[in-house]
Amino acid sequence: MRLQYPSSVKIVRVPCTGKVDVQHLLRAFEKGADGAYIVGCMEGECHYNKGNFRARKRMMQVRRILDTIGLGGRRVEMFNLSSAEAPKFVQAAKEMHERILELGPNPMRKPRSGEGEDVEGAEGEEKARALGC
């Protein structure tokens, strides 16, 4: 069974979600990411003891920071899943994709060549969004 998630989702693998630092998430937004989410082990089942609890705490810190600077904390989220829950992973990816489409592009992202003022109307908006994913 091949499950498909939105092509805008870029996966960055880490040994444990406890290795994801506030700095990593903020750097993603600084580089132009429209959103970020962490998928970790089920709570209490972390192979590295408390890594997923550290990740959730850091995600919440980033959420507060994004709210404070005006980007919106809803751009970052954490999901706890088992490695056997591929359909739930796809569901989480689609949920975040829809949320980010609703929130719009990251206002910190600098327009790339071909984006911006020369792109007009709904078709242009869709083109700009596609280029930003």
Image (cartoon, rainbow, N blue to C red):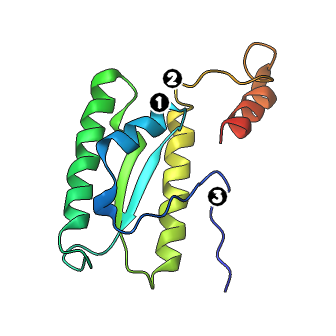
Viewport quadrant of the C terminus: top right
Which residue sits at x=38%, y=36%? 26
Q: Which mark is residue 6?
A: 3
Q: Tag 3: Cα neighbours inside 10 Å, few (<14), some, or many (≥20)?
A: some
Report the residue marked by disc 1: 30
Residue 25 sits in quarter: top left
Residue 73 sits in quarter: top left
With 116 as the anchor, is 79 left or right in this view? Answer: left
x, y percent for residue 23: 34, 40
x, y percent for residue 89: 49, 70
Residue at disc 1, secondary structure: helix
x, y percent for residue 14: 42, 64
Q: Are marks 2 and 3 in contact (CB under 8 Å)?
A: no
The disc, 1 or 2, on the residue closer to the chain's N-terminal end is: 1
Q: Measured along the vertical axis of the image, is residue 16 above or below residue 33?
A: below
Q: Are marks 1 and 2 in contact (CB under 8 Å)?
A: yes
